[in-house]
Image (tube, grey):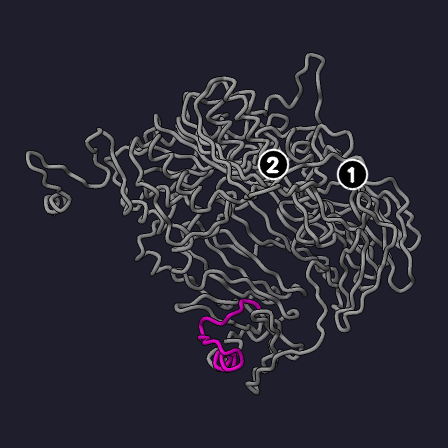
């Protein structure tokens, strides 16, 4: 078989035999990869692999407390499932074949039962009908009577608007003021009148991100709106311009930087609908900050703001510009009077949870729940709402509370996710509950896996999809009252395995200190041969708000990591020190020195893997990433020039003095300039390391990147030129921040590693057949 395989690749030329087998050396002494090698790698991208997994992506949409629906992938398409949680019954939400027939007749298109042209539905209150949209048309389908009707009438436009809790009103921005639209009649009412360009209402602008949707929070009774006037007076601007024939179109907007003396401020107000008027809260404006994000928006809502259930009180947290000082405050929405309740100060940065705000007020019992890392671990505490005094700790131990998901106020019990308490991977998330006095602690998801949990609105049930990077998801419905469990879906990956998919290999190594355990994933070629030596490539996203590995749940593809491995590399992703979900001291490892980027841990971990596995060629080490990963990958080849030989860097924030204010000031601190002309930001500036370049560096950026403006990369380019260094640069005209996985960039990244790290020739101008144009 071996001889036959080789002979099929012979090309006979008089006087010689040239072997053209992939991976062999050609006449110039270099190996070469051909189109088939790249095609094989492409087949490991999500555009090819995700369609080979069934029953894996269950996202329950609750209807009240005891019913929910989800869209389930099956061979040939998908189906809608509805579940009666109380009865523990699962069934198809409707007759898909009948609806496809009716919809085909109504629209003139040919629809299939497994390929219905919508992925979301809404049930009527009696659950006898569903509503959905197709190509701009709205339909109602009566499930029991099998009747399809196109919806007529003047439905109010609610795009870029925020619906009230009762669904009757939608708030939106027009001409710098806040307006309201009646969702039934479409009638519009202006709510404010004094907003103008740089001092407008509910403006959704953090500099690095902007939206048309207003930032506000409706009161539970839909009679009041908590929002602010967005004060950008005196704030610096950012400038970009399009690439086109003729005059470019400029884009100019407010974008504060760490060196600015003035940043965005928010003047808090409450807008009343039942009695016209705007109540200004009696306090100085807050800095544009929140306790978990770089914006005053979290999960699509006004962050760090909470109404009491009766609407008589408005609670919020004010965060200082440097993220170190937070104050819980209470306001009277009718008088504007504000009272300080509690405050906490940190030496580095304060966070109120992991991707979720975890403080909540309980005015009915005169208490509030507070999240703090004062013990070096993230935990929940119960305080007196009147005095701010601590009543008791709710959770404790050397592990971390992540997200407070549900509060049962009557039973005085809370449900939350946490990590690091159970044996195994400390990044696996589990669901727990505990009484507010700290008693009755319970683990609800005992399987050693990562648990994606959705709790019903009333807290009676939860859906748990649990998996690992190696093991596909199992999804179950559980009752929190009696503990009963019903199986919903067990993912089928048989076609994925037949496709040649191999799972990543979880690993652990020691950090730079030689003691702390770090965790990561390794991707090997599907035709891995332990007798060979493989170059190693590090995929990096250093955070500090997240890590390189990403979710510990199952994924058929993780960007192009396995695809890149298929070309003949070992690809690793490692969550270094300085990333979240562990202890506070772990997270703040390189606070004030963002140029660190966890790179000492990446180098130490890669060396340990090479000692452990002789098939890793540590003398051929590469690295790549985008955004923060672009910052880190360039920093890697400049700060460790004798270790990293090749780097590919996309959209990097190479000097955070040129990036948005909230980011640098949270992780690096406020800018301090010294008499000698240096500053505390010099240690993170990649351009100041340009003279160190020895290996091959490919820089890339989109010229209309409104998140990380491309001037960040040009700073590095300018200093590389000054240092007379060879490098490569691609500017993507009119692209934004998410170009790193579009076909041309991905192909250039693969080519760069094949040519400069593997020492082979890539195929000429390979074209992908199907590929997503987005992704980090």
Determine if the magenta segment contains residue 112: yes
- x, y percent for residue 527: 27, 45
Query: Count the marks: how many?
Result: 2
- x, y percent for residue 441: 63, 52
- x, y percent for residue 59: 54, 62
- x, y percent for residue 338: 89, 46
Q: Is residue 395 above or below residue 223?
A: above
Q: Are marks 2 and 1 in contact (CB under 8 Å)?
A: no
Q: Considering depth in this image, is 280 or 208 the residue closer to the camera?
A: 208
Q: Secondary structure at mark 2?
A: loop
Residues rendered magenta in the picture: 99-120
At 72% from the left and 59% from the top, the residue drawn is: 161
The numbered mark at residue 709 is 2
Pick whichever of labels 2 and 1 is earlier in the sequence. Answer: 1
Left or right of 251, for residue 111 = left
Q: Is residue 712 above or below residue 300?
A: above
The numbered mark at residue 287 is 1
For mark 2, does the 10 Å Cα neighbourhood hold few (<14), some (14 to 19), or many (20 or more) residues? many
């Amino acid at each position: 078989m071996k001889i036959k395989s080789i002979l099929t690749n012979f090309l006979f030329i008089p006087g010689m035999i040239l072997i053209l087998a992939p991976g062999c050396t050609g006449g110039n002494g270099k190996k070469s990869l051909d189109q088939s090698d790249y095609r094989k790698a492409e087949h490991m991208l999500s555009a090819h692999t995700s369609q080979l997994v069934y029953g894996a992506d269950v996202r329950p949409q609750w209807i009240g407390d005891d019913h929910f629906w989800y869209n389930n992938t099956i061979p040939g398409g998908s189906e809608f499932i509805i579940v009666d949680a109380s009865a523990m019954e699962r069934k198809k939400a409707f007759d898909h074949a009948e609806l496809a027939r009716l919809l085909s007749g109504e629209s003139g298109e040919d629809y299939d039962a497994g390929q219905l042209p919508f992925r979301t539905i809404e049930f009527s209150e009696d659950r006898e009908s569903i509503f959905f949209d197709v190509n701009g048309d709205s339909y109602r389908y009566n499930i029991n009577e099998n009747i399809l009707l196109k919806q007529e009438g003047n439905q109010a436009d609610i795009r870029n608007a925020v619906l009230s809790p009762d669904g009757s009103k939608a708030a939106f921005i027009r001409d710098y003021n806040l307006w309201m639209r009646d969702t039934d009649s479409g009638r519009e009412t202006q709510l404010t009148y004094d907003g103008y360009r740089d001092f407008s209402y509910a403006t959704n602008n953090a500099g690095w991100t902007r939206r048309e949707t207003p930032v506000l929070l409706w009161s539970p009774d839909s009679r009041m709106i908590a929002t602010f006037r967005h004060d950008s007076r005196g704030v610096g601007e950012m400038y970009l311009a399009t690439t086109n024939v003729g005059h470019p179109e400029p884009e100019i907007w407010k974008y504060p930087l760490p060196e600015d003396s003035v940043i965005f401020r928010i003047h808090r107000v409450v807008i009343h609908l039942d009695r016209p008027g705007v109540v200004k809260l009696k306090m100085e404006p807050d800095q544009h900050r929140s306790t978990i994000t770089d914006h005053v928006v979290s999960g699509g809502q006004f962050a760090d703001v909470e109404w009491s259930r009766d609407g008589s009180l408005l609670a919020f947290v004010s965060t200082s510009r440097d993220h170190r000082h937070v104050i819980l405050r209470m306001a009277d929405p009718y008088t504007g009077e504000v009272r300080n309740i509690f405050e906490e100060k940190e030496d580095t940065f304060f966070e109120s949870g992991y991707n979720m705000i975890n403080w909540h007020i309980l005015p009915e019992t005169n208490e509030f729940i507070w999240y703090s890392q004062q013990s070096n671990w993230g935990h929940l505490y119960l305080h007196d709402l009147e005095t701010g005094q601590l009543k008791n700790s709710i959770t404790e131990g050397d592990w971390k509370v992540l997200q407070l998901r549900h509060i049962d106020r009557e039973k005085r019990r809370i449900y939350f996710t946490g990590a690091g308490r159970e044996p195994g991977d400390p990044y696996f998330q589990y669901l727990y509950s505990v009484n507010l006095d700290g008693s009755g602690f319970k683990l609800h998801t005992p399987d050693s896996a990562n648990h994606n949990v959705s709790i019903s609105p009333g807290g009676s049930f939860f859906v748990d999809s649990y998996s690992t990077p190696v093991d596909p998801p199992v999804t179950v419905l559980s009752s929190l009252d009696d503990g009963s469990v019903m199986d919903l879906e067990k993912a089928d990956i048989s076609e994925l395995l037949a496709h040649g998919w191999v799972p990543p290999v979880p690993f652990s190594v020691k950090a730079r200190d030689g003691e702390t355990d770090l965790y990561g994933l390794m991707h090997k070629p599907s035709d891995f041969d332990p007798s060979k030596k493989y170059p190693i490539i590090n995929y990096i996203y250093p955070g500090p708000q997240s890590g390189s590995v990403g979710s510990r749940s199952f994924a058929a593809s993780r960007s192009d990591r396995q695809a890149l491995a298929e070309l003949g590399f070992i690809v690793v992703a490692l969550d270094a020190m300085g990333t979240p979900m562990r202890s506070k001291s772990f997270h703040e490892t390189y606070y004030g020195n963002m140029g660190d980027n966890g790179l000492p841990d990446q180098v130490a971990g890669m060396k340990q893997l090479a000692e452990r596995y002789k098939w890793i060629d540590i003398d051929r080490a590469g690295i790549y990433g985008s955004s923060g990963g672009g910052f880190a990958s360039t920093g890697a080849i400049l700060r460790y020039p004798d270790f990293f030989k090749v780097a590919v860097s996309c959209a990097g924030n190479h000097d955070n003095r040129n990036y948005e204010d909230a980011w640098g000031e949270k992780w690096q601190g406020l800018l301090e300039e010294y008499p000698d002309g240096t500053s505390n930001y010099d240690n993170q500036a990649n351009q100041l390391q340009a003279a160190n370049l020895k290996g091959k560096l490919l820089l890339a950026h989109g010229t209309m990147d409104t998140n990380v403006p491309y001037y960040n990369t040009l700073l590095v380019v300018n200093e590389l030129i000054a240092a007379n260094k060879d490098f490569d640069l691609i500017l993507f005209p009119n692209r934004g921040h998410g170009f790193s996985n579009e076909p041309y960039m991905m192909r250039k990244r693969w080519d760069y590693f094949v040519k400069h790290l593997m020492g082979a020739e890539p195929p000429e101008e390979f074209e992908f057949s199907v590929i997503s144009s987005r992704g980090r």
